[in-house]
Amino acid sequence: MTGTIHIVDDEETIRDALAFLFASRGLAATGWGSGEAFLEAQPLDDCACIILDVRMHGLSGPEVFERLRAMGSEAPVIFLTGHADVPVAVSTLKAGAFDFVEKPFNDNQIVDLAKAAIARFVRRQVETRTVDTIARKIRSLSAREAEVMERMIDGKLNKQIAGELGIAIRTVEVHRGRVLAKIGAGNAAELARLVSPVLPMLGASRQDGGGA
Amino acid sequence: MTGTIHIVDDEETIRDALAFLFASRGLAATGWGSGEAFLEAQPLDDCACIILDVRMHGLSGPEVFERLRAMGSEAPVIFLTGHADVPVAVSTLKAGAFDFVEKPFNDNQIVDLAKAAIARFVRRQVETRTVDTIARKIRSLSAREAEVMERMIDGKLNKQIAGELGIAIRTVEVHRGRVLAKIGAGNAAELARLVSPVLPMLGASRQDGGGA
DNA sequence: CGGTCCATTGCGGTAACCCACAATAGCGGC
DNA sequence: GCCGCTATTGTGGGTTACCGCAATGGACCG
Protein backbone atom coordinates (compact mmCIF):
# COMPACT_ATOMS: atom_id res chain seq x y z
CA MET A 1 0.00 0.00 0.00
CA THR A 2 1.50 3.29 -1.07
CA GLY A 3 -0.99 5.54 0.69
CA THR A 4 -4.61 6.53 0.86
CA ILE A 5 -6.67 8.92 -1.27
CA HIS A 6 -8.56 11.38 0.92
CA ILE A 7 -11.78 12.78 -0.46
CA VAL A 8 -13.03 15.98 1.15
CA ASP A 9 -16.50 17.03 -0.02
CA ASP A 10 -19.62 18.02 1.81
CA GLU A 11 -21.84 16.21 -0.65
CA GLU A 12 -22.15 12.64 0.54
CA THR A 13 -23.24 11.52 -2.94
CA ILE A 14 -19.99 12.59 -4.52
CA ARG A 15 -17.89 11.29 -1.65
CA ASP A 16 -19.45 7.88 -1.89
CA ALA A 17 -19.30 7.78 -5.66
CA LEU A 18 -15.62 8.59 -5.65
CA ALA A 19 -14.85 6.18 -2.83
CA PHE A 20 -16.66 3.42 -4.67
CA LEU A 21 -14.91 4.30 -7.93
CA PHE A 22 -11.47 4.18 -6.38
CA ALA A 23 -12.24 0.99 -4.47
CA SER A 24 -13.34 -0.67 -7.68
CA ARG A 25 -9.98 0.23 -9.23
CA GLY A 26 -8.02 -1.11 -6.28
CA LEU A 27 -7.19 2.27 -4.74
CA ALA A 28 -7.68 2.87 -1.02
CA ALA A 29 -9.81 5.95 -0.32
CA THR A 30 -11.37 7.66 2.69
CA GLY A 31 -14.09 10.31 2.71
CA TRP A 32 -14.45 13.43 4.87
CA GLY A 33 -17.55 15.59 5.12
CA SER A 34 -15.74 18.87 5.75
CA GLY A 35 -12.37 20.50 5.66
CA GLU A 36 -12.44 20.88 9.42
CA ALA A 37 -13.05 17.16 9.97
CA PHE A 38 -10.23 16.24 7.62
CA LEU A 39 -7.74 18.70 9.11
CA GLU A 40 -8.62 17.66 12.63
CA ALA A 41 -7.95 14.00 11.90
CA GLN A 42 -4.60 14.98 10.35
CA PRO A 43 -3.89 11.71 8.61
CA LEU A 44 -0.78 13.35 7.16
CA ASP A 45 1.37 10.25 7.15
CA ASP A 46 -1.14 8.38 5.10
CA CYS A 47 -1.92 11.12 2.57
CA ALA A 48 -0.74 10.11 -0.87
CA CYS A 49 -3.36 12.22 -2.63
CA ILE A 50 -6.05 14.64 -1.51
CA ILE A 51 -9.19 15.49 -3.45
CA LEU A 52 -10.79 18.75 -2.35
CA ASP A 53 -14.11 20.20 -3.35
CA VAL A 54 -13.77 23.95 -3.88
CA ARG A 55 -17.05 25.13 -2.39
CA MET A 56 -17.97 23.54 0.92
CA HIS A 57 -19.73 24.54 4.10
CA GLY A 58 -17.15 25.86 6.51
CA LEU A 59 -13.63 25.90 5.12
CA SER A 60 -13.39 26.07 1.34
CA GLY A 61 -11.12 23.76 -0.62
CA PRO A 62 -8.48 26.42 -1.19
CA GLU A 63 -8.54 27.28 2.51
CA VAL A 64 -7.96 23.65 3.44
CA PHE A 65 -5.17 23.55 0.86
CA GLU A 66 -3.54 26.61 2.33
CA ARG A 67 -3.62 25.15 5.85
CA LEU A 68 -2.22 21.86 4.65
CA ARG A 69 0.74 23.62 3.08
CA ALA A 70 1.18 25.70 6.24
CA MET A 71 1.27 22.42 8.18
CA GLY A 72 4.09 21.23 5.97
CA SER A 73 2.14 18.74 3.90
CA GLU A 74 3.54 18.19 0.43
CA ALA A 75 0.78 15.80 -0.64
CA PRO A 76 -0.58 16.37 -4.16
CA VAL A 77 -4.02 18.01 -4.17
CA ILE A 78 -6.67 17.66 -6.85
CA PHE A 79 -9.47 20.21 -6.76
CA LEU A 80 -13.02 19.52 -7.84
CA THR A 81 -15.36 22.33 -8.73
CA GLY A 82 -18.87 22.63 -9.99
CA HIS A 83 -18.44 26.21 -11.13
CA ALA A 84 -16.22 27.72 -13.79
CA ASP A 85 -13.93 29.66 -11.52
CA VAL A 86 -10.80 30.59 -13.42
CA PRO A 87 -9.17 32.80 -10.78
CA VAL A 88 -9.43 30.04 -8.18
CA ALA A 89 -8.03 27.50 -10.62
CA VAL A 90 -5.13 29.79 -11.47
CA SER A 91 -4.27 30.66 -7.89
CA THR A 92 -4.42 27.09 -6.60
CA LEU A 93 -2.35 25.73 -9.47
CA LYS A 94 0.23 28.47 -9.01
CA ALA A 95 0.28 27.58 -5.31
CA GLY A 96 1.22 24.04 -6.23
CA ALA A 97 -2.05 22.15 -6.64
CA PHE A 98 -1.72 19.02 -8.75
CA ASP A 99 -4.82 19.58 -10.86
CA PHE A 100 -8.14 21.34 -11.03
CA VAL A 101 -11.11 19.45 -12.45
CA GLU A 102 -14.62 20.61 -13.31
CA LYS A 103 -17.66 18.50 -12.45
CA PRO A 104 -19.03 16.46 -13.90
CA PHE A 105 -15.82 14.57 -14.21
CA ASN A 106 -14.94 11.51 -16.20
CA ASP A 107 -14.31 8.43 -14.08
CA ASN A 108 -11.24 7.31 -15.94
CA GLN A 109 -9.85 10.82 -15.92
CA ILE A 110 -10.13 11.09 -12.14
CA VAL A 111 -8.60 7.68 -11.57
CA ASP A 112 -5.71 8.46 -13.89
CA LEU A 113 -5.16 11.80 -12.19
CA ALA A 114 -5.16 10.19 -8.77
CA LYS A 115 -2.70 7.56 -9.93
CA ALA A 116 -0.43 10.23 -11.39
CA ALA A 117 -0.66 12.23 -8.18
CA ILE A 118 0.23 9.21 -6.08
CA ALA A 119 3.12 8.42 -8.40
CA ARG A 120 4.49 11.93 -7.97
CA PHE A 121 4.00 11.67 -4.23
CA VAL A 122 5.94 8.43 -4.03
CA ARG A 123 8.74 9.83 -6.18
CA ARG A 124 9.05 12.88 -3.95
CA GLN A 125 8.97 10.76 -0.83
CA VAL A 126 12.02 8.88 -2.07
CA GLU A 127 13.86 12.10 -2.94
CA THR A 128 12.96 13.67 0.38
CA ARG A 129 14.14 10.64 2.29
CA THR A 130 17.49 10.75 0.52
CA VAL A 131 17.90 14.44 1.23
CA ASP A 132 16.83 13.99 4.85
CA THR A 133 19.39 11.28 5.37
CA ILE A 134 22.17 13.60 4.26
CA ALA A 135 20.72 16.53 6.19
CA ARG A 136 20.59 14.52 9.40
CA LYS A 137 24.23 13.55 8.95
CA ILE A 138 25.18 17.16 8.37
CA ARG A 139 23.36 18.24 11.51
CA SER A 140 25.27 15.61 13.49
CA LEU A 141 28.50 17.48 12.79
CA SER A 142 30.02 19.68 15.48
CA ALA A 143 30.37 23.38 14.72
CA ARG A 144 34.05 23.01 13.99
CA GLU A 145 33.53 20.01 11.76
CA ALA A 146 30.97 21.93 9.75
CA GLU A 147 33.40 24.78 9.23
CA VAL A 148 36.03 22.37 8.02
CA MET A 149 33.55 20.55 5.76
CA GLU A 150 32.47 23.74 4.07
CA ARG A 151 36.07 24.43 3.14
CA MET A 152 36.70 20.87 2.05
CA ILE A 153 33.86 21.17 -0.43
CA ASP A 154 35.42 24.33 -1.79
CA GLY A 155 38.46 22.20 -2.53
CA LYS A 156 40.73 23.95 -0.08
CA LEU A 157 43.87 22.24 1.17
CA ASN A 158 44.24 21.29 4.81
CA LYS A 159 46.99 23.88 5.01
CA GLN A 160 44.66 26.64 3.78
CA ILE A 161 41.87 25.53 6.11
CA ALA A 162 44.26 25.51 9.05
CA GLY A 163 45.32 29.04 8.15
CA GLU A 164 41.74 30.33 7.84
CA LEU A 165 40.64 28.79 11.13
CA GLY A 166 43.86 29.55 12.96
CA ILE A 167 44.51 25.95 14.02
CA ALA A 168 47.15 23.31 13.31
CA ILE A 169 47.05 21.19 10.17
CA ARG A 170 46.85 18.07 12.30
CA THR A 171 43.66 19.37 13.88
CA VAL A 172 42.14 19.96 10.47
CA GLU A 173 43.07 16.41 9.53
CA VAL A 174 41.22 15.08 12.55
CA HIS A 175 38.10 17.09 11.74
CA ARG A 176 38.36 16.15 8.11
CA GLY A 177 38.50 12.48 8.97
CA ARG A 178 35.52 12.78 11.28
CA VAL A 179 33.49 14.64 8.64
CA LEU A 180 34.14 11.95 6.05
CA ALA A 181 33.24 9.25 8.57
CA LYS A 182 30.03 10.92 9.73
CA ILE A 183 28.79 11.72 6.23
CA GLY A 184 29.86 8.35 4.94
CA ALA A 185 32.08 9.57 2.14
CA GLY A 186 35.40 8.07 1.18
CA ASN A 187 36.99 11.36 0.19
CA ALA A 188 36.38 15.02 -0.52
CA ALA A 189 35.02 14.47 -4.02
CA GLU A 190 32.30 12.12 -2.83
CA LEU A 191 31.58 14.48 0.05
CA ALA A 192 31.11 17.41 -2.31
CA ARG A 193 28.83 15.41 -4.58
CA LEU A 194 26.66 14.24 -1.71
CA VAL A 195 26.52 17.39 0.38
CA SER A 196 26.71 20.37 -1.96
CA PRO A 197 23.17 19.95 -3.37
CA VAL A 198 21.73 19.72 0.14
CA LEU A 199 23.67 22.48 1.86
CA PRO A 200 21.72 25.45 0.43
CA MET A 201 18.52 24.00 1.94
CA LEU A 202 19.86 24.02 5.49
CA GLY A 203 20.24 27.76 6.03
CA ALA A 204 18.92 28.47 9.50
CA SER A 205 18.42 24.94 10.71
CA ARG A 206 21.98 24.30 11.93
CA GLN A 207 22.61 24.12 15.59
CA ASP A 208 25.77 23.78 17.61
CA GLY A 209 26.54 20.11 17.55
CA GLY A 210 28.94 19.99 20.45
CA GLY A 211 30.50 21.58 23.46
CA ALA A 212 33.49 23.91 23.80
CA MET B 1 17.08 46.91 -21.40
CA THR B 2 16.21 43.51 -20.04
CA GLY B 3 13.93 42.47 -22.88
CA THR B 4 10.69 43.26 -24.62
CA ILE B 5 7.11 42.35 -23.78
CA HIS B 6 5.38 40.82 -26.79
CA ILE B 7 1.64 41.22 -27.01
CA VAL B 8 -0.17 38.80 -29.32
CA ASP B 9 -3.85 39.60 -29.79
CA ASP B 10 -6.03 39.95 -32.85
CA GLU B 11 -7.96 42.84 -31.34
CA GLU B 12 -6.06 45.99 -32.13
CA THR B 13 -7.84 47.86 -29.33
CA ILE B 14 -6.41 45.57 -26.67
CA ARG B 15 -2.98 45.44 -28.27
CA ASP B 16 -2.74 49.21 -28.33
CA ALA B 17 -4.13 49.61 -24.83
CA LEU B 18 -1.58 47.18 -23.43
CA ALA B 19 1.28 48.68 -25.42
CA PHE B 20 0.37 52.14 -24.19
CA LEU B 21 0.01 50.90 -20.63
CA PHE B 22 3.42 49.25 -20.60
CA ALA B 23 5.04 52.23 -22.31
CA SER B 24 3.63 54.54 -19.69
CA ARG B 25 5.23 52.36 -17.00
CA GLY B 26 8.61 52.33 -18.71
CA LEU B 27 8.34 48.81 -20.14
CA ALA B 28 9.20 48.12 -23.78
CA ALA B 29 6.39 46.31 -25.61
CA THR B 30 5.59 45.21 -29.15
CA GLY B 31 2.25 44.10 -30.55
CA TRP B 32 1.42 41.32 -32.99
CA GLY B 33 -1.92 40.80 -34.73
CA SER B 34 -1.75 37.02 -34.90
CA GLY B 35 0.13 34.04 -33.60
CA GLU B 36 1.43 33.36 -37.08
CA ALA B 37 2.89 36.85 -37.43
CA PHE B 38 4.56 36.60 -34.06
CA LEU B 39 6.01 33.13 -34.64
CA GLU B 40 7.23 34.10 -38.09
CA ALA B 41 9.15 37.08 -36.77
CA GLN B 42 10.69 34.84 -34.10
CA PRO B 43 12.03 37.55 -31.85
CA LEU B 44 13.15 34.83 -29.46
CA ASP B 45 16.27 36.56 -28.25
CA ASP B 46 14.32 39.60 -27.21
CA CYS B 47 11.40 37.81 -25.54
CA ALA B 48 11.38 38.55 -21.84
CA CYS B 49 7.63 38.06 -21.53
CA ILE B 50 4.85 37.05 -23.92
CA ILE B 51 1.19 37.95 -23.53
CA LEU B 52 -1.11 35.69 -25.53
CA ASP B 53 -4.80 36.05 -26.13
CA VAL B 54 -6.48 32.65 -25.92
CA ARG B 55 -9.00 32.95 -28.74
CA MET B 56 -7.63 34.43 -31.94
CA HIS B 57 -8.16 34.03 -35.64
CA GLY B 58 -5.76 31.41 -36.91
CA LEU B 59 -3.57 29.91 -34.22
CA SER B 60 -5.01 30.05 -30.72
CA GLY B 61 -2.95 31.24 -27.77
CA PRO B 62 -2.34 27.74 -26.45
CA GLU B 63 -1.27 26.63 -29.92
CA VAL B 64 1.23 29.46 -30.14
CA PHE B 65 2.43 28.55 -26.64
CA GLU B 66 2.92 24.93 -27.63
CA ARG B 67 4.96 25.89 -30.71
CA LEU B 68 7.08 28.28 -28.70
CA ARG B 69 7.99 25.53 -26.25
CA ALA B 70 8.66 23.16 -29.13
CA MET B 71 11.02 25.81 -30.51
CA GLY B 72 12.89 25.79 -27.22
CA SER B 73 11.65 29.09 -25.88
CA GLU B 74 11.59 29.31 -22.09
CA ALA B 75 10.08 32.78 -22.01
CA PRO B 76 7.30 33.28 -19.45
CA VAL B 77 3.83 33.42 -21.02
CA ILE B 78 0.81 35.23 -19.64
CA PHE B 79 -2.55 34.26 -21.14
CA LEU B 80 -5.47 36.62 -21.54
CA THR B 81 -8.97 35.32 -22.00
CA GLY B 82 -12.41 36.79 -22.33
CA HIS B 83 -14.17 33.54 -21.51
CA ALA B 84 -14.22 31.46 -18.35
CA ASP B 85 -12.38 28.46 -19.69
CA VAL B 86 -11.11 26.40 -16.77
CA PRO B 87 -9.74 23.41 -18.73
CA VAL B 88 -7.62 25.70 -20.90
CA ALA B 89 -6.36 27.56 -17.84
CA VAL B 90 -5.46 24.30 -16.13
CA SER B 91 -3.73 22.76 -19.11
CA THR B 92 -1.68 25.84 -19.96
CA LEU B 93 -0.59 26.39 -16.37
CA LYS B 94 0.36 22.74 -16.02
CA ALA B 95 2.34 23.12 -19.24
CA GLY B 96 4.33 25.92 -17.67
CA ALA B 97 2.45 29.12 -18.41
CA PHE B 98 3.30 31.95 -16.05
CA ASP B 99 -0.27 33.10 -15.46
CA PHE B 100 -3.77 33.09 -16.86
CA VAL B 101 -5.83 36.27 -16.56
CA GLU B 102 -9.46 36.97 -17.36
CA LYS B 103 -10.54 40.13 -19.15
CA PRO B 104 -11.28 42.72 -18.19
CA PHE B 105 -8.00 42.92 -16.39
CA ASN B 106 -6.72 45.44 -13.91
CA ASP B 107 -3.93 47.64 -15.25
CA ASN B 108 -1.77 47.39 -12.17
CA GLN B 109 -2.27 43.64 -12.01
CA ILE B 110 -1.06 43.15 -15.57
CA VAL B 111 1.93 45.41 -15.10
CA ASP B 112 2.91 43.63 -11.89
CA LEU B 113 2.52 40.25 -13.55
CA ALA B 114 4.64 41.32 -16.49
CA LYS B 115 7.31 42.62 -14.14
CA ALA B 116 7.28 39.37 -12.17
CA ALA B 117 7.50 37.37 -15.39
CA ILE B 118 10.44 39.43 -16.60
CA ALA B 119 12.13 39.04 -13.23
CA ARG B 120 11.78 35.27 -13.44
CA PHE B 121 13.05 35.32 -17.00
CA VAL B 122 16.15 37.30 -16.05
CA ARG B 123 16.84 35.02 -13.09
CA ARG B 124 16.62 31.93 -15.28
CA GLN B 125 18.81 33.53 -17.91
CA VAL B 126 21.56 33.94 -15.33
CA GLU B 127 21.21 30.35 -14.11
CA THR B 128 21.18 29.04 -17.65
CA ARG B 129 24.30 30.96 -18.53
CA THR B 130 26.15 29.50 -15.53
CA VAL B 131 25.06 25.99 -16.41
CA ASP B 132 25.96 26.51 -20.06
CA THR B 133 29.46 27.62 -19.14
CA ILE B 134 30.06 24.38 -17.28
CA ALA B 135 28.32 22.32 -19.95
CA ARG B 136 30.53 23.79 -22.66
CA LYS B 137 33.63 22.92 -20.65
CA ILE B 138 32.37 19.37 -20.17
CA ARG B 139 31.75 19.00 -23.89
CA SER B 140 35.32 20.14 -24.56
CA LEU B 141 36.61 17.01 -22.85
CA SER B 142 37.82 14.09 -24.93
CA ALA B 143 35.94 10.81 -24.57
CA ARG B 144 38.61 9.36 -22.33
CA GLU B 145 38.77 12.45 -20.17
CA ALA B 146 35.02 12.29 -19.64
CA GLU B 147 35.25 8.67 -18.53
CA VAL B 148 37.95 9.57 -16.05
CA MET B 149 36.05 12.62 -14.80
CA GLU B 150 32.93 10.60 -14.11
CA ARG B 151 34.95 8.31 -11.85
CA MET B 152 36.75 11.18 -10.20
CA ILE B 153 33.40 12.61 -9.14
CA ASP B 154 32.47 9.28 -7.65
CA GLY B 155 35.54 9.68 -5.47
CA LYS B 156 37.41 6.77 -6.98
CA LEU B 157 41.16 6.50 -6.62
CA ASN B 158 43.43 6.74 -9.63
CA LYS B 159 44.31 3.12 -9.02
CA GLN B 160 40.66 2.06 -9.22
CA ILE B 161 40.03 4.14 -12.32
CA ALA B 162 43.08 2.65 -14.00
CA GLY B 163 41.76 -0.82 -13.20
CA GLU B 164 38.28 -0.11 -14.55
CA LEU B 165 39.54 1.41 -17.78
CA GLY B 166 42.38 -1.05 -18.23
CA ILE B 167 45.08 1.61 -18.46
CA ALA B 168 48.10 2.60 -16.39
CA ILE B 169 47.82 4.79 -13.33
CA ARG B 170 50.11 7.31 -14.94
CA THR B 171 47.70 7.69 -17.85
CA VAL B 172 44.83 8.31 -15.46
CA GLU B 173 46.91 10.98 -13.78
CA VAL B 174 47.41 12.74 -17.09
CA HIS B 175 43.71 12.67 -17.93
CA ARG B 176 42.89 13.78 -14.41
CA GLY B 177 45.17 16.76 -14.70
CA ARG B 178 43.68 17.73 -18.04
CA VAL B 179 40.12 17.43 -16.72
CA LEU B 180 40.88 19.70 -13.79
CA ALA B 181 42.55 22.20 -16.09
CA LYS B 182 39.74 22.23 -18.66
CA ILE B 183 36.96 22.54 -16.10
CA GLY B 184 38.90 25.05 -14.09
CA ALA B 185 38.87 23.19 -10.79
CA GLY B 186 41.76 22.92 -8.42
CA ASN B 187 40.95 19.41 -7.28
CA ALA B 188 38.38 16.64 -7.30
CA ALA B 189 36.18 18.19 -4.61
CA GLU B 190 35.73 21.43 -6.52
CA LEU B 191 35.19 19.44 -9.70
CA ALA B 192 32.41 17.42 -8.10
CA ARG B 193 30.74 20.52 -6.74
CA LEU B 194 30.81 22.28 -10.10
CA VAL B 195 30.00 19.40 -12.41
CA SER B 196 27.72 16.99 -10.56
CA PRO B 197 24.63 19.25 -10.67
CA VAL B 198 25.07 19.75 -14.42
CA LEU B 199 25.91 16.21 -15.49
CA PRO B 200 22.38 14.76 -15.33
CA MET B 201 21.23 17.40 -17.83
CA LEU B 202 23.70 16.36 -20.52
CA GLY B 203 22.39 12.90 -21.33
CA ALA B 204 22.50 12.62 -25.10
CA SER B 205 24.32 15.83 -25.91
CA ARG B 206 27.87 14.53 -25.48
CA GLN B 207 30.00 14.10 -28.50
CA ASP B 208 33.48 12.81 -28.99
CA GLY B 209 35.71 15.75 -28.18
CA GLY B 210 38.90 14.51 -29.69
CA GLY B 211 40.68 12.14 -31.98
CA ALA B 212 41.50 8.46 -31.62
C1' DC C 1 34.56 15.06 41.67
C1' DG C 2 34.66 11.63 37.98
C1' DG C 3 32.85 10.77 33.34
C1' DT C 4 31.85 12.29 28.76
C1' DC C 5 32.36 14.99 24.71
C1' DC C 6 34.88 18.00 22.00
C1' DA C 7 38.91 20.78 20.33
C1' DT C 8 43.55 20.80 19.92
C1' DT C 9 48.35 19.23 18.78
C1' DG C 10 52.48 16.24 17.92
C1' DC C 11 55.01 12.06 15.87
C1' DG C 12 55.69 8.81 12.39
C1' DG C 13 54.43 6.33 8.51
C1' DT C 14 51.73 4.69 4.22
C1' DA C 15 49.41 5.80 0.26
C1' DA C 16 47.71 9.03 -2.99
C1' DC C 17 47.97 13.15 -5.72
C1' DC C 18 50.38 16.30 -9.04
C1' DC C 19 53.75 17.52 -12.18
C1' DA C 20 58.01 18.16 -15.30
C1' DC C 21 60.59 15.59 -18.60
C1' DA C 22 60.66 12.11 -22.03
C1' DA C 23 59.06 8.78 -25.33
C1' DT C 24 55.95 5.59 -28.42
C1' DA C 25 52.00 5.15 -31.37
C1' DG C 26 47.58 5.69 -34.15
C1' DC C 27 44.60 8.91 -36.90
C1' DG C 28 43.54 12.58 -40.10
C1' DG C 29 44.95 16.62 -42.99
C1' DC C 30 48.13 19.20 -46.15
C1' DG D 1 55.81 11.82 -45.81
C1' DC D 2 55.53 15.64 -42.25
C1' DC D 3 52.58 17.94 -38.79
C1' DG D 4 49.27 18.12 -35.18
C1' DC D 5 46.19 16.02 -31.87
C1' DT D 6 45.29 12.45 -28.61
C1' DA D 7 46.25 8.32 -25.94
C1' DT D 8 49.45 5.90 -23.68
C1' DT D 9 53.33 4.79 -20.32
C1' DG D 10 57.61 5.44 -17.53
C1' DT D 11 60.93 7.90 -14.05
C1' DG D 12 61.58 10.61 -10.28
C1' DG D 13 60.39 13.72 -6.89
C1' DG D 14 57.73 17.24 -4.13
C1' DT D 15 53.28 17.88 -1.87
C1' DT D 16 49.00 16.13 0.38
C1' DA D 17 45.83 13.18 2.36
C1' DC D 18 44.81 9.90 5.86
C1' DC D 19 45.48 7.17 10.02
C1' DG D 20 46.98 5.12 14.62
C1' DC D 21 48.87 6.29 19.03
C1' DA D 22 49.20 9.50 22.64
C1' DA D 23 48.22 13.55 25.33
C1' DT D 24 46.34 18.22 27.18
C1' DG D 25 42.58 21.27 28.39
C1' DG D 26 37.85 23.25 28.65
C1' DA D 27 32.71 22.64 29.12
C1' DC D 28 28.87 20.17 30.85
C1' DC D 29 26.40 16.55 33.69
C1' DG D 30 25.10 13.60 37.38
Image: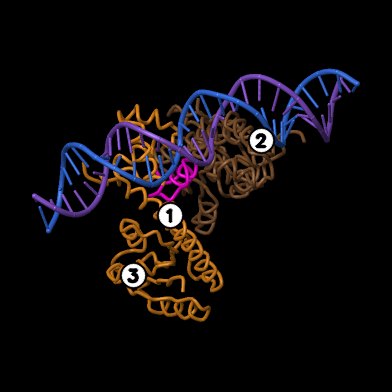
Chain colours: A orange, B brown, C purple, D blue
Amino acid type indicated by mark 1: Gly
Of C18 and A130, nearer the camera is: C18
Dot 3 and dot 1 within a common chain: yes
Amino acid type indicated by mark 3: Pro
Q: Tell me if mark 1 has few (under 14), some (14-19) or many (20+) residues whose alpha carbon lies within 10 angstroms of its own.
A: some
Q: Write the residue at 31% across / 68% down.
A: A42
Q: Tell me if mark 2 has few (under 14), some (14-19) or many (20+) residues whose alpha carbon lies within 10 angstroms of its own.
A: few
Which of label 3 and label 1 is nearer to you? 3
Query: What's the distance in space between the residues labelled 3 and 1, CA to CA?
Result: 20 Å
Q: Which residue is mark 2?
A: B171
Query: What's the distance in space between the residues labelled 2 and 3, CA to CA?
Result: 58 Å
Chain letter of disc 2 in the image: B
Answer yes or no: is residue B18 visible: no
Q: Which residue is mark 3?
A: A43
Can you say which quadrant of the picture contains the C terminus of chain B? Answer: top right
Q: Write the residue at 68% across / 39% down.
A: B144
Q: Which residues are magenta?
A: A181-200
Q: Is residue A9 left or right of residue B132?
A: left
Q: Which mark is residue A96?
A: 1
Chain letter of disc 1 in the image: A
Which of label 2 and label 3 is nearer to you? 2
Residue D16: give x, y in percent of width and height. Answer: 46, 31
